[in-house]
Image (cartoon, helix red, strand yellow):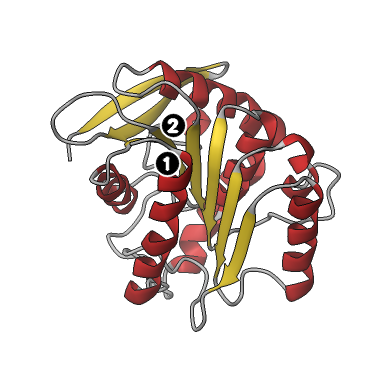
Amino acid sequence: MPTTTLKIPTADGGADAVAASPEGGGRHPGVLLYMDAFGLRPALERMAEELAGHGYYVLVPNVFHRHGPAPVVDLPPHIGNDVRPAVFAGILPLMEAHTPARAEGDAAAYLDFLTARPEVAAGPVAVVGYCMGAALALRTAAAHPGRVAAVAGFHPAALVTDAPDSPHRLVGDMDAEVYFGLAENDMTPEAAEELGRALDAAGVTRSIEVYPGTVHGFTMSDTDAFDASARERHWDRLLPLLARNLTV
């Protein structure tokens, strides 16, 4: 699928991004894809290209753009368990600096940019996120009801916290269909139940399921967490969700 490198205007400067679009031109439903903590890199670009192959224009911003263009931290070609702690130590300050206020400001900029692209069809978009991106996806949909028709998050992090602005506390006005696919170690059963109750109280159509035998990061092909069958299952859940809520 054709890919392009773009710069998204935000209140804090330009955010570098990659976009993937279907072959043949035309206008297509938009998908905002939020990266995992390891950032915008070839594995995410391949994910966007695969999704674009199903008829979607996919925008993947560098969430850590305030700290420089991607890759913001040095990454090995394969993020094995032996190097994961050292890599994550470099990423943690970036995650901590990406406050909810920054995330919300960026989300508006990303949506404005995505929906203004000439390749993107009119109407609401979908937001998909991996790891920390799942929480960003939920925040985005909650802050922009009517602009987001579907939310999906895989091996999510920080969806349910004790903070007053925890993502699960923000969904009252949300009108998107929601799906979360969890690794076995992502959330306690109690946290998953709390998330489900919050979505139910908001009247949101939702599904939350655990992928047996998986660990956090199972979709990411450049990590030791990768699980090929779980990744296929993730496509089996994501594509029907998009088809139900966006017009290809």
Q: Is residue 35 visible?
A: no
Answer whether labels 2 and 1 touch (C-beta < 8 Å): yes
Report the front residue among 26 and 117: 26
What's the distance in space between the residues labelled 2 and 1, CA to CA? 6 Å
Amino acid type of the residue tagged 2 in the rendering: Gly
Q: Nearer the viewer, residue 31 or 76?
A: 31
Q: Position of residue 40 (x, y in %)?
A: 38, 44
Residue 11 placement (x, y as % from top left)? 57, 16
Kindly identify which residue carries mark 1: 72
Across and down, in percent, residue 51 comes to 31, 47
Question: Residue at (70%, 36%) from the top-left corner?
Answer: 100
The residue that mark 2 highlights is: 68
The kind of secondary structure element at disc 2 is loop
* Type of amino acid under label 1: Val
The quarter holding residue 104 reads top right
Query: Considering only vertical position in the picture, is 186 above or below 26?
Result: below
